[in-house]
Amino acid sequence: MRGNFAVEGLPIAERIEKGAVSIELETVASGFAAPVDLQISPDGTGRLFVIDQAGKIYLIVNGVLQPALFLDLTNRLVSPLGIIGSHDENDYDERGFLGLAFHPDFANPASPGNQKIYTYTSEPITSPADFTTDPAPASINHQSVIAEWTVAVSDANLIDPNSRREILRIDQPQFNHNGGMLAFGPDGYLYISLGDGGAANDSGDGHGPAGNGQNINTIHGSIVRIDPLDPLTTPDSNDLVAANGKYRIPVDNPFVGLDGIDEIFAHGFRNPFRFSFDSVTGKLIVADVGQNNVEEINIVEREGNYGWNLKEGTFRFDPATGQVSGNLAGLPAELTDPAAEYDHDDGIAVVGGYIYNGTAIPELAGKYVFGDFSRSFAAPAGRLFYADLETGLIQEFIIGADNHELGLYVKGFGVDADGEIYVLASSTLGPYGTGGVVLKIVGL
């Protein structure tokens, strides 16, 4: 499976085959530009919140897409989205509205987290950042911003637009590799995924000689763990108040009191676009998008180093060429390999999903449901997979009685209160148009 080679596209001999699980995809809502995330509010209402990369949160109540937006952040985003800036539906971009999380005490009136949500957005450079790269970039493309919002007192289906409290602002040297996922762990802390800052091979402006993924003195290329509440509302907490005074840092984060950034929980990532926690075991599962060869699914633990840019998957990575080889001699022993991987013969960008803990498809129980963005950027050819993370075996779903192709770009996943999983996809490459859909995975 691994040899002494340095070729593009073929480090893994085995292809992903069709498995035995047949599914159908039920359309829940459509008309989005680029849906990238779906969340539920922890209040028992069953509402679904769809995050559109173009800047909006849509609300689905009892299966019906509501005409009013929960929140519109379009005017806060870097503009125009798209590498070319043409507003064309196939103008690709990795910036935008990327993540949403509800505080676990969202429905607890006695908690400072009551009615609080958190957003991850790509914004223009409007104020000094809390973090930049090491060394600082010669130019900054945009800033990643984490903010807190509060639901309007008068309307449970609307965010108070005046409630915004900025928590964290991070310089990004390039447009890509932003990470963008937000989720609260079973420990009650907010986890944030941050990519290596962009460009390619973790090199160039804003990337030090060793790259950002391996540099614990930059926040890029990491999973961050914080308590996002205003420290003034948590006076009894033993956690550290952040340097900007806007959040707390868990005292058991691995680099607290040591060399390295206190907020980092784990590092060595290229672009951990999506991650999730297993609702049964609590395991943190991070899908890390690869460079030219290998896509990763990692089970992430505190203080873990997941290899980038020394490794891509289980292979040595050469930043000078962007290629991989099987020669692992001399690599640090502490690098953690992925639980599952595949190469670019089967797709070009992993999109992380969720462990299936629903009941509608019993044969999926305990499997990790995820996908790949597309076989190419030129056409919508996304794929839907499920994996056994104990063995690393990845299989592809059979879609429909006719075993048809998905025919869409896969852009995200979501899970509802019953543990059933949703696919977020679009017929268009970029964050424009109306080709985005929310599809529910159901048994055939």
Image (cartoon, grey):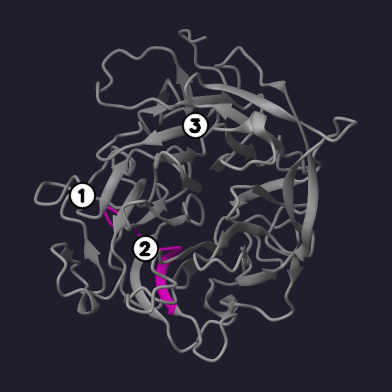
**First of labels 3, 1 by sequence position:** 1
* Mark 3 lies on residue: 296
In the image, residue 137 lies in the stretch drawn in magenta: yes
* Mark 1 lies on residue: 253
Instruction: Judge by depth and name the residue closer to the eye, 93 or 145.
Output: 145
Q: Mark number for residue 280? A: none
Badge 1: residue crowd in 10 Å (few <14, some 14–19, many ≥20): many
Horizontal arrangement in the rendering, residue 390 relative to residue 57 (left or right): left
**First of labels 1, 2 by sequence position:** 2
- Residue type of the residue flagged with mark 3: Glu
Q: Secondary structure at mark 2?
A: strand
In the image, residue 352 lies in the stretch drawn in magenta: no
Horizontal arrangement in the rendering, residue 418 relative to residue 269 (left or right): right
* Residue 88 sits above or below residue 2 on the image: below
Which region shows up in magenta? 133-149
Instruction: Judge by depth and name the residue closer to the eye, 159 or 96.
Output: 159
**First of labels 2, 3 by sequence position:** 2
Gap in angstroms between the C-alphas marked 3 and 1: 24 Å
* Mark 2 lies on residue: 171
- Residue type of the residue flagged with mark 2: Asp
User: What residue lies at 39% left-to-right and 76% top-to-bottom?
Assistant: 114
Badge 2: residue crowd in 10 Å (few <14, some 14–19, many ≥20): many
Q: Secondary structure at mark 1?
A: loop
Image quadrant of residue 96? Answer: bottom right
User: What residue lies at 85% left-to-right and 30% top-to-bottom?
Assistant: 403
